[in-house]
Amino acid sequence: MPPLLKLLLIRLGLGLLTLFLVSVVVFVATQALPGDAAKAILGKDSADTVRYEALRKELRLDRPILEQYTSWLGGVARGDLGNSLVGGGAKVTALLGARIVNSTTLVLLAALFSIPISIVIGALSAIWRDSKFDNVVNIGNLSLAALPEFVIGIVLVLLFATTVFQWLPSVSNVDSLTPLRNQMLLFVLPVMTLVLAVIPYVSRMLRASTVEVLESEYVMMARLKGLSESRVLWHHALPNAIVPTIQVIAINIAWLAGGIVTVEYLFGFPGIGTALVDAVANRDMPVVQALVLLIAAVYVVLNLIADILTILISPRLRTGLR
Amino acid sequence: MSTRDGESQFEFLNKPVTRREVLKGAAVVGAGAAFGPLIAACGGSSDSSSSSASPAAGAPTMGGHLRVAAGQGSAKEDLDAHATAYTMQSMDMRFNIYDSLLEYSPEGVQGMALAESLEPNADGTQYTVKLKSGLVFHDGSPVNADAVVYSFERIMDPKNPGLAAQQLRGLAPGGTKKIDDLTVTFELEAANAIFPESLATYSAAIVPVGYDPKGGNGIVGTGPFMLASPGDFQPGVQCVLQKNPDYWREGGGPYVDTLSIIEFADTTAQMNALLGGAVDYVNMIPGAQRTIATGAGNMLLEAKTGSWIPFTMNCDVKPFSDVRVRQAFRLIVDRPQMMAQGADGLQWLGNDMYGPFDPGYPADLPQRAQDLEQAKSLLKQAGYADLSVKLVTSTSVSNNAPSAATVFAQQAKGAGVTVKVDNVTGDVFWGDQYLSWPFAMDNWGTRGYLAQTGMGTMPGVLYDETHWSKTNEKYMSLVKEAYTTVDDTMRNELISEAATIEYNEGAYIIYAFDNQVDAHSAKVMGMVADYSGLGSCASNARYRLAYFG
C-alpha cells in the first residue's frame, strides 16, 4: 500500500472516531442543559403537566437516556439522521437541506475569493516589504483583524446598501424556492464580509513566512545563479512559504463553516449557524447532532487535506514518507 | 415587547425573543368584553412625524407584493389554526389566513367576524351564534354550522386540546350543537360571561370540516390571504401568502396580491432590509431605531397596547405574605424614572392594575407614586426594617426587564431595602422554579380583566405566580360573580371593585404598559394601529388593509 494512502486511511479512521466522540459529548451536553424539547416547545404552557408529559411521551423523551442515544446512533449508522423533535417531526435532512446548500455556497465563495487575494497580497507585501504598499497593507490588515466580522458587515451595509450607496441588497434572505444562481447578488455582502475577515490572517501569515524564506540561503543561491526575480519568487520561495499558510487557510475555512452566526444574523442569511442556535434553544437533539457532526466533519476533512497538501508540497516530508 | 437593542452580541443564545413571545402570546385572548371609547383615543398616540396615511383619500390601489420583515422565527412554527403559536411571527401568519366568529377592532371594540349575531341566555350558560350567509373557505367549501361544530370539537379534543380550550371556559367536548345550517349553540357547563371574548381569539379560528393542516386539504381558512402551496411556508424563514380573491369582508381588502412575512433573527438586519428597500414593512422596531427609520424617509406606526411587564411578589413566602411589605414595595417604585431608563420611551404609566382597556378598569383611582417615607414606615410596622431580597429577572422575560430590575434595586436603597438582582437565562427562569420565585418578573399581553384573572390570578389557574387571590375571600367571590354576570354594567362594576382590591392589596407591581412601533416605506398606505400588541402594530390580519400609493 502506498504510504500516502495508508496515512489517509489511518487519518480517516481517526476522523470517524473523533466524530463519534463529538456526538457523545454533544449528547451529554444537551442532557446537561436544563429543560428538554417538550419544555422548549410548550414554553410557559409546560406548567400544564398533563400536556407536558404527553408531549414527552410523543417525542420519546421518557425513554432511558442511553436508549435514546443508541437508537439515534443506530439511525445514523443506517444513514438516517432522524426526525426533528420540534419541527413537526420533519426529517432532519429535509429541514436542513436548503440551509446547508446556502452555507456551503457562502463558504466556498468566501474561500474562492479570499485565498487567491490573500496569497497575492501576502506575497507582494513580502517582496516589497517596508514599501508604502506594505505599510498600507499592514495597517489595513491589522485594522481588519481587530474588528469583529459583524462590525465589518455593518460598515459594508452602510456603505453599499443603505446609507451611502444603494447598490447591493442589504439583507440576504436566500429564497430556497428560487434557483441559487438567480440570487447570487444576495451573497455579495456576506461574502465580502467574510473575505475581509479572512484576508488579514492568511495574508499576514504568508507575508511572514515569505519574508523568512526570501532571506534564506537557497533563495540567495537562486539569485546568484542569475534567475529572474519572478522565478525565484514563484518557483523557489513561495512553495516553501505556503506550507504554514495552508494550515491557516484550513482553519479559517473551517471557522467559516461553523462560526459565522453573527454574519447570518446581520444579513438575515438562512444558514446553518442560526439553525444551530435555534436547535440548541429548542433542545432539538437530532438537529443539534446533525449540525455539530457536519461542522466537526468539515474540520476533520479540511485538516486532513491541509496535512496531505503539506506533505505533497514539501519535499522533506514527501520523501520521509517512504 | 419593545426593544432588543440593549442586547449583547451573544444574548441570542438565551433565545430572548421567542421565549418572551411564547409567553406573551401563548394564550392570547382579546381584551375586555366591550371596550368603551377609552382606547379609541389611544390609537393616535403618535406625533406628526408618525402614523400611516389613512385610506380616506380615494380608493386603494390594487396589486403589488407587500414584504414584511418580522422578528425571529423558529423551526417550531406551524400554521395549524388551533395549535399554540410558538412565535409572534406564526401568530401573524395565522391572523392573515384564518378568521374567528368574533373579532376586535383596532380600537379594541368587540364585533362580529364570521358570525352575524351572538345571543347569550339570561345566566350566561348558553350562547347562540348565527353565521353570515354565503361565506366560503379558501377551497370553496361553505362556512356553515358543520364547520363551526367541527372546529370547536377539534379545539376541545381531549387527546390533543387546542390552545383556545383553556379559555373557552365552560365548553366541553360535545357542547357545540348545530341548530340549522347557519346556527350553532354553545352549551356551557358553567356560566361564563366572557365567553364571547374567547370566541374572538385567533386560536378559536373556524376551519372547514375535515381540516388537516399536515395533509389532506392543508392550510385552509377564510382569511384575506391563503397559502398557495405548502412549500411557501418555511418555518423559521418565511411565509408567502397569496390574496384570497373571495374574501368576505366588503371594502376590507385585501389590496396587495402577495404578502411575504420574512423572519429576521436580528433587529438591525430588519431595519437594514427596510433601508435598503428589500422589504416594505418592519414589525416592532426598538425605540432607538425610530429616528433611523424616519431619517431615511420611512413612516412609523405607533400603537398603545395593554402589554405589561410586572414585578411579581409571591404571597406564599415571607416577606411578601405580609400585605404591608407588598404595599411598601409598590411605594418604592419611581415609575417615570423606571420607564425612562431602558424602554426608549416605549411605555406608558401603569397603576398596579392590569387590563387598562377593560371598561371595568377603575381609571379614577389615584396614580400611585414613589413615597419612600411611607414605604419605610410600612416595612417597620411589618418588622422588616432591615430587609434583603433577591429579585429574579431575565432578558427572556423582556429585554427591558433586567434594566427595570436594576432600577428597582437602586430605588429600594432609598427605603433601606437591599435588593440583589439575579439575571438568569430563560431556561432557568421558566424552569422548575417559575411560578414559585419569591420575587421575580413576568411578561403578559393585552387582555380583559377577567380573562387575565383566569390566566394568572385566580387560585389554581396555570400561571398563578403571586398566589395572592386565595388570601382574599372577598376578591375571589367578586371575580367569580363577575364571571357569571351577563349584564355588562353590573359586570363592569364587579370588575372595578375587584381591581380596586388588587390596587390596594395585590401582589403585582405594574409600573408601565408597553407601546409598540412599526416602520414602513412611505409607499405603503392604509395600515391601522392595533391595541393588541401582538406581532405588529397592524396585527389581526390588517395587512389586508395595506396598499401601495
Image (cartoon, coloured by chain):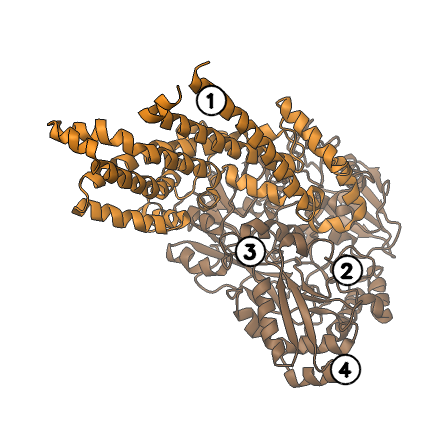
Percent coordinates x, y for residue A162 in the rendering: 36, 48
Residue A203 seen anywhere in this rendered image of the structure? yes
Q: Residue farthest to the top?
A: A1
Using the image, name the chain to which the residue with label 1 belongs.
Answer: A
Q: Tell me what residue is drawn at x 44 percent, y 39 percent.
A: A255
| Image quadrant in which the N terminus of chain B is located | bottom right
Q: Nearer the viewer, residue A55 or B453?
A: A55
Percent coordinates x, y for residue A254 in the rendering: 45, 36
The nearer-to-camera label among 1 and 4 is 1
Chain letter, colour orange in render? A
Instruction: Identify which amino acid the numbered label 1 is placed on.
Output: Leu
Q: Which residue is mark 3?
A: B529
Q: CA distance from mark 1 to mark 4?
A: 76 Å
Q: CA distance from mark 1 to mark 2?
A: 62 Å
Q: Do callouts 1 and 4 mark residues in contact (Cβ within 8 Å)?
A: no
Chain letter, colour brown in render? B
Q: CA distance from mark 4 to mark 2?
A: 27 Å
Callout 2: 10 Å neighbours few (<14), some, many (20+)?
some
Q: Do callouts 3 and 4 mark residues in contact (Cβ within 8 Å)?
A: no
Q: Do callouts 4 and 2 mark residues in contact (Cβ within 8 Å)?
A: no
Percent coordinates x, y for residue B516 in the rendering: 55, 58
Instruction: Identify which amino acid the numbered label 3 is placed on.
Output: Ala
Question: Reading the chain from its start, which is encountered first: label 4 or label 2?
Answer: 4
Mark number displayed over residue A8: 1
Callout 3: 10 Å neighbours few (<14), some, many (20+)?
many
Q: Which residue is mark 4?
A: B383
Q: Tell me what residue is drawn at x 54 percent, y 28 percent.
A: A14
Left or right of A317 in this view: B434: right
The nearer-to-camera label among 1 and 2 is 1
In the displayed structure, A189 sits above or below B192; it is above
